[in-house]
Amino acid sequence: MNLFLLLPFCLSGSVAAADYWVEVQLSDKETGLSKQLKVGASGEHWFAFGQTGDSGYQQLYTGPRFAPKEWLEVGVGLGAETVGDDWDTRFASYIWVGAWPWSTVAVYEDGDLTGPWHKVQVTHNVTTNLSLGVQNKKYLGTGPFVTYKVTEHLLLWGNALAEGGQTTSQFGLKFTF
């Protein structure tokens, strides 16, 4: 089952006023190169996220998001994940806290097929186009990352994460519209 076919149904609400993004990600782990495609959307009170890759894993979830303060945003989502022909539920939550030039985001996901996953990222905006920081991703480790905003709608990013003697480099292109 291709979960991306369900994405239009997750984008209910004020779709016209939403922000959308598409990201292509390459991961160069010592065990080889992998590719992922990620898509996302968010409106005033909702968000949706989808991911697929060459490993056969897919996930898609959506849910409410709240920004009670300019420096605080939280969201929770429910959806599905697939591995091969198996699929089951997937839960996600995130919190973003920030005030120029610093921000922190923490994402937690859990699914019945693949279990828990997390990402924590602390960012310092050096300029309006250049950001540096530290990331931690489950299964990949901890290390530095950099983002560079090429244009209003194109962002390049990269990281170098290490865990248990294994290093992973990731590079991404993110298009917003």
Image (cartoon, rainbow, N blue to C red):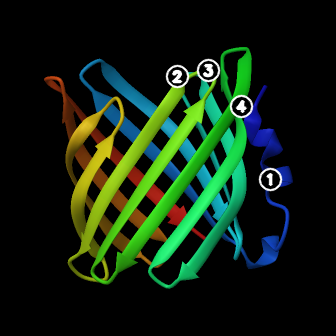
Q: Which residue lies furthest to the top in this view?
A: 85
- 27 and 48: which is toward the camera: 48
Q: Residue furthest left?
A: 165
Q: Distance of mark 2 from mark 1, alpha carbons?
A: 24 Å
The type of residue carrying mark 2 is Ser
The quarter of the rendered structure image containing the N terminus is top right
Q: Residue 61, percent across and down? A: 69, 46
**Mark linked to residue 55:** 2
Residue hosting label 4: 89
Residue sitting at 24 percent across and 22 percent down?
Answer: 30
The type of residue carrying mark 3 is Leu
Q: Distance of mark 3 from mark 2, alpha carbons?
A: 14 Å
**Mark linked to residue 10:** 1
The type of residue carrying mark 1 is Cys
- Location of residue 168 with respect to 135 vertically, above or below: above
The secondary structure type at the circle numbered 3 is loop
The secondary structure type at the circle numbered 4 is strand
Q: Within 10 angstroms of label 1, few (less than 14), some, or many (20 or more) residues?
A: some
Q: Distance of mark 1 from mark 3, alpha carbons?
A: 21 Å
Q: Which of marks 4 and 2 is nearer the N terminus?
A: 2
Residue sitting at 61 percent across and 20 percent down?
Answer: 113
Q: Distance of mark 1 from mark 4, alpha carbons?
A: 15 Å
Residue sitting at 32 percent across and 21 percent down?
Answer: 32
